[in-house]
Amino acid sequence: MNERLKILKLLEDGKINSDEAARLLEALSQSDIKHKKGRHRIWASIETIPEVIATAISTSFKHPGSKEVLQFPRKKKIEFKGISGDVDIIGNSTDTIEIEKDGFVRIKEKNDTLEIKAVSGDIKITAPESTDFEIKGISGDMNIFNTKGRIEIASVSGDIKGTELSGSLTGDLVSGDIDLDYIRIDEIRLKVKTADIVLRLNKKIEAEIELETKHGEITCEFELKEEEKKGNWLKGIINKPKAKIEIKNEHGDISIKTRR
């Protein structure tokens, strides 16, 4: 078993987390480069980590995990941790959770939580629409449809698209564009390093918004009450101050649009 495979195996077994795996793979890469070229290379930013990990996975695992469909009883929360691969989340009115996976995935039931750890491969999760999600990953795109619970996302890269959503969303993201379509909102809080963000809202939504981008533009199709605007910062109220929408973006545009 080569060193990269050992690291990914430790991750799959839950003995290290995604951040620890990334650091180990980085150190291994630097060690290889030093051996071959006699010098170290310092990575410019964390955004290069997904490519390295994806390369390690593709070279280490010659035979991907088999495609499989698994079913579990309803849970209050689903925790997903992944390194490489796309994730689809679909809410429905059933009382079961269905997981379609085609890579290296480990699933564990823990009280009222379903824990999913994916080293590689795409995964599709179909669950009751009220299920809460906690998602942590390194790379891969996400598609979310018809959820009504609380969603927490911490990801390094990958686009996020949400359709017919309700409930709340919090995210701490590095890169990847975001397009969210909301029928009803409890709370949205996003902190993003590099992304174009589009938020599509029901015309009847009641919310207080506060938007900021250091390097980008802010546009809003709603007529705001108590509007305050200064440079790349906008604050105001859509209809009534019931929900809270707070978005901070370092590089990229923020657009608030009416839902079609």
Image: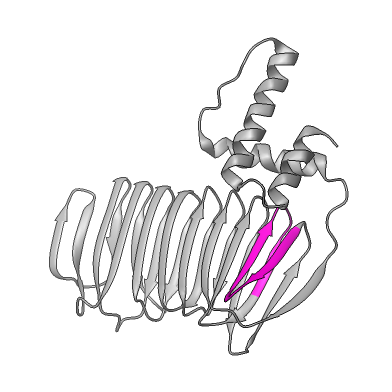
Q: Is residue 4 left or right of residue 242?
A: right
**Colouring style:** one colour
Which residue lies most toward the top here?
A: 38
| Magenta region, residue range | 105-125
Count the labels in the image. Answer: 0
Q: Is residue 208 above or below residue 139?
A: below
Kindly tell me whether residue 221 is visible in this rendering: no
Residue 121 against residue 156 in the figure, above or below: below
Residue at screen point 47% across, 80% down: 148
Residue nearest the observer in this picture, 48 or 74:
74
Residue extending farthest to the front is: 111
Estimate the x, y position of residue 40 in percent, counting from the top left: 61, 16
Q: Quadrant of residue 117?
A: bottom right
Q: Quadrant of the C terminus?
A: bottom left
The structure residue drawn at horizontal position 57% and vertical position 76%, both measured from the top left corner, is 112
Q: Main secondary structure of the magenta part?
A: strand
- Residue 153 vs 113, above or below: the answer is above
Above or below for 39 versus 65 = above
Q: Is residue 7 visible?
A: yes
Residue at 46% x, 63% y is: 152
Residue 73 x/y as whole percent: 66, 83
Residue 245: % across, % down: 30, 66
Q: Is residue 124 magenta?
A: yes
Residue that appears at 30% across and 49% down: 213
State the image quarter where residue 187 is shown.
bottom left
**Frontmost residue, 164 versus 218:** 164
Task: Please identify the quadrant where the N terminus is shown.
Answer: top right
In the depicted view, which residue is nearer to us: 153 or 2?
2
Residue 59 in percent (x, y) is at: 81, 39
